[in-house]
Amino acid sequence: MPKVFLAGAATGSHATHQSREPVRYDLRGRIAVVTPLDLAGDLEVVSSLAIFLLASVLAALSGLAWRRERDRRMLYVTVAYAFFALRGLFVFVEEPLAAAFDTELLEHASPFLVVIALLLFFVAVSRE
């Protein structure tokens, strides 16, 4: 069996591992093994980008509808979509920023944007 070198911790150390998985290379040209946890992290980043883009478009369209109609409910919907867009943006940029900044507070506080957005949707639907 071929030896596969796994990328180590932040210290740059390597570990030798026996594996039958396909060989993949990391950004530094070292041989790496992709785990299901890596794929889950990638899925989170891609889905957060999709949420950010879709919520941004919906916020812009809702904002235009609010400007045309001047209905307070459309304003609530616009702000709710903007909160969803912020949440998607925070999750998307969290991983690249984690190397330079402490993003733990951002990671744990951003779900409250979803709570606020859901409350705004409820207010918009329940108002007359």
Image (cartoon, rainbow, N blue to C red):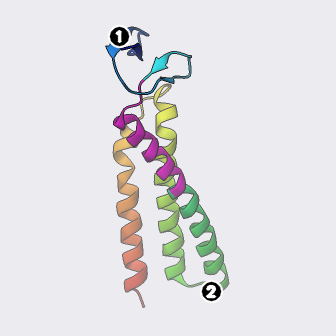
Q: Nearer the viewer, residue 108 or 36?
A: 36
Magenta: main secondary structure = helix
Assess disc 1: are there few (<14), some (14-19) or many (≥20) residues with their C-alpha within 10 Å of its C-alpha: few
Evaluate if marks 2 and 1 touch, with contact meaning CB atoms under 8 Å apart. Answer: no
Q: In the image, what residue occupies the spot 51% across and 15% down?
A: 30
In the depicted structure, whether residue 35 falls above or below residue 62: above
Residue 92 at what x, y percent from top left?
50, 44
Q: Quadrant of the N terminus?
A: top left
Question: Residue 14 vs residue 69: left or right?
Answer: left
Dividing the picture into quarters, in which one does residue 63 lie?
bottom right
Numbered mark located on residue 15 in the image: 1
**Residue matched to label 2:** 69
Tell me where the magenta segment starts and ends, as one range.
Answer: 33-50
21 lies above or below 55: above
The count of marks equals 2
Q: How would you rate the neighbour count of disc 2 (Cα within 10 Å): few for under 14, some for 14-19, many for 20 or more?
A: few
Q: Residue at x 42, y 91 (%)?
A: 128
Q: Is residue 95 left or right of residue 122?
A: right
Amino acid at dot 2? Glu
Magenta segment includes 64: no
Query: Is 35 one of the magenta-colored residues?
Result: yes
If you read the primary sequence from the N terminus, does the residue marked by circle 2 or circle 1 appear first? 1
Amino acid type, label 1: Ala
The residue sitting at 51% across, 32% down in the picture is 97
CA separation in Å, label 2 and label 1: 63 Å
Indicate whether 76 appears above or below 40: below
